[in-house]
Image: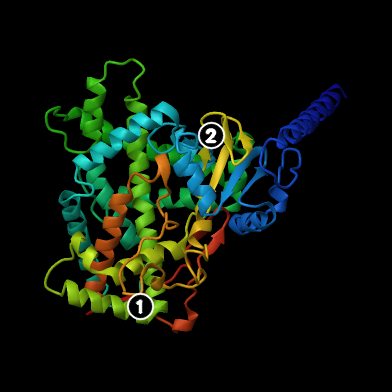
């Protein structure tokens, strides 16, 4: 009886805290942007379509305008919808909106360390160093272009080996793209059949898939409780530790053979910086080295390969677009030399196709969460320090003011009346402001070189009827995923 009584008291106390929290949230609500009324603890979770959060947010925007507040469980988030609101925050008030928001799945791995998922002074130091070091190792220059070309050559040989048989291109593209960032971070590439390499790619894919899933959404909102409960999140927690262990081992290998006068890769450069630092509060220490290296490897392995894979599906659905790309490749590059990045300046149609693939895919429509770094006034609303912000990048990619037919795959969105490439302010696939993707230069070069090299050598064939191709990305929680498919690479 005593135990039952204690349980009842604890339950009542917990519910009381939740009600008081809700009342407090309503009290400060008058200072925050408007939004739907949240329930205690659950917030607005039950009011959202858990399978397609982006669509739910679009509907809320129609009711509350470009700036509004939602509660994802106990997590309060200010949403910015549309080009004007996103630009005003990320560019015009870049410093105030420069913090990194909560992403429980990835925070389980990175724990606020490393260049991608940290904030404040740590983020600033690591970001400056990472950009400079990537540039030193050729990112945006001829050096890294040669690495991409070498990897593209290996990919062509692999695809030729399929002899036109239908294949799922996922693993081929993932291995190829991952090897580019591997050569920069670790100083070496992996063999395509390396079991450890394939295991790493599989684990990263599973982590991304979990983060986007309905269970991953719940974990994002209620991770303080769910991390102790049984479920798929426990396997993700194990996988994150394996990834950290792998990078730690790579760092140890570099330490044992380090020459301070001759850095071989990103890890070497970071180790040298650690030796040179005199400040006891420096952010150049082992934990940040491991997590920065891992975040570069993680980010550099997935986005480009997914974009290419989706691009191939779109070209099969639109053979007229593929034919025009082949024609431009023949005119500018020909068949007797490898594509070079400088070719993109003479190939407006091909570049427009790549841009439209990025726009149409819209893989992360909610953007990566930001956090307010100090008390801020934005459009007449008061946003206290620590407030999380969702800059809805997907709303830019589908804005009819910039893209007249946003629901259609149409490369003409990026071409002017003379057929030349035009710049569209709302096209921000790598975000903007102080936290834009630091690998955007590398990603642009990879997309162009891999895309043109493959199309220089192959035509695409779908194993069934073209009308059977489902080209629409499937919404999955916070993200959108590519339909699974097989295709044939037919040598030209």
Is there any visible trace of residue 173 in the rendered image? Answer: yes
Residue occupied by mark 1: 321
Which class describes the residues within 10 Å of circle 1: few (<14), some (14-19), or many (20+)? some
How many dots with numbers?
A: 2
Real-space Cα separation, disc 1 to disc 2, in angstroms: 43 Å
Q: Secondary structure at mark 2?
A: loop
**Quadrant in which the N terminus appears:** top right
Q: Which mark is residue 303?
A: none
Residue occupying image coordinates x 70% and y 44%: 34
Q: Which image quadrant for residue 113?
A: top left
**Quadrant in which the C terminus appears:** bottom left
- In this picture, is 57 found above or below 471? above
Q: Which image quadrant for residue 136?
A: top left
Is there any visible trace of residue 161 in the rendered image? Answer: no
- Residue 375, horizontal then vertical, whole percent: 57, 29
Q: Secondary structure at mark 1?
A: helix
Q: Residue furthest right?
A: 1
- 450 lies left or right of 142: right
Closer to the eye: label 1 or 2: 2
- 88 lies left or right of 447: right
Residue 11 vs residue 471, the one in the foreground? 471
Which class describes the residues within 10 Å of circle 2: few (<14), some (14-19), or many (20+)? many
- Residue 332, horizontal then vertical, whole percent: 18, 73
- Residue 19, horizontal then vertical, whole percent: 79, 33
Residue 242 vs residue 108, the one in the foreground? 108
- Residue 82, horizontal then vertical, whole percent: 54, 54
Residue 380 vs residue 207, the one in the foreground? 380
Q: Mark 1 or mark 2, which has the lower sequence index?
A: 1
Residue occupied by mark 2: 372
């Amino acid at each position: 009886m005593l135990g039952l009584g204690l349980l009842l008291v604890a339950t009542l106390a917990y519910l009381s805290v939740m009600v008081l929290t809700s009342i407090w949230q309503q009290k400060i609500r008058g200072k925050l942007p408007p939004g739907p009324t949240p329930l205690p603890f659950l917030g607005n979770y039950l009011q959202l379509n858990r399978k397609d959060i982006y669509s739910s947010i679009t509907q809320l925007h129609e009711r509350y305008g470009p700036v509004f507040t939602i509660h994802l469980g106990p997590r309060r988030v200010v949403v910015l919808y549309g080009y004007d609101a996103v630009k005003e925050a990320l560019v015009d008030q870049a410093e105030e909106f420069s913090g990194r928001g909560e992403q429980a799945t990835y925070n389980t791995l990175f724990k606020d360390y490393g260049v991608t998922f940290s904030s404040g002074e740590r983020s600033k130091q690591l970001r400056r160093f990472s950009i400079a070091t990537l540039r030193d190792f050729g990112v945006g220059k001829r050096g890294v272009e040669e690495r991409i070309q070498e990897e593209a050559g290996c990919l062509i040989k692999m695809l030729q080996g399929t002899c036109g048989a239908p294949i799922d291109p996922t693993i081929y593209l993932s291995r190829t793209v991952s090897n580019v960032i591997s050569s920069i971070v670790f100083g070496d590439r992996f063999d395509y059949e390396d079991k450890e390499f394939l295991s790493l790619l599989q684990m990263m894919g599973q982590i991304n898939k979990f983060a986007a899933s309905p269970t991953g959404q719940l974990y994002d909102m209620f991770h303080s409780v769910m991390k102790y409960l049984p479920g798929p999140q426990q396997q993700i927690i194990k996988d994150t530790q394996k990834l950290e262990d792998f990078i730690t081992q790579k760092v140890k290998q570099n330490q044992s053979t380090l020459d301070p006068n001759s850095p071989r890769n990103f890890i070497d450069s970071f180790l040298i910086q650690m030796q040179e630092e005199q400040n006891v509060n420096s952010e150049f220490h082992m934990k940040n080295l491991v997590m920065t290296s891992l975040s570069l490897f993680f980010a550099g392995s997935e986005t480009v390969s997914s974009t290419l894979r989706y691009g191939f599906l779109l070209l099969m659905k639109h053979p007229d677009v593929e034919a025009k790309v082949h024609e431009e490749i023949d005119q500018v590059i020909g068949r007797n030399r490898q594509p070079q990045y400088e070719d993109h300046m003479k190939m407006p149609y091909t570049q427009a196709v790549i841009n439209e693939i990025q726009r149409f895919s819209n893989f992360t429509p909610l953007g990566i969460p930001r956090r307010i770094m100090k008390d801020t006034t934005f459009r007449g609303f008061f946003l206290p320090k620590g407030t999380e912000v969702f800059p809805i990048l997907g709303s830019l990619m589908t804005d009819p003011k910039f893209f007249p037919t946003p629901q259609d795959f149409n490369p003409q969105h990026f071409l002017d009346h003379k057929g030349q490439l035009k710049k569209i302010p709302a096209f921000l696939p790598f975000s903007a402001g102080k936290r834009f993707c630091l690998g955007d230069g590398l990603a642009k070069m990879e997309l162009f070189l891999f895309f043109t090299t493959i199309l220089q050598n192959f035509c695409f064939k779908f194993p069934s009827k073209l009308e059977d191709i489902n080209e629409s990305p499937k919404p999955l929680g916070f993200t959108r995923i590519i339909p699974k498919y097989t295709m044939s690479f037919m040598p030209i």
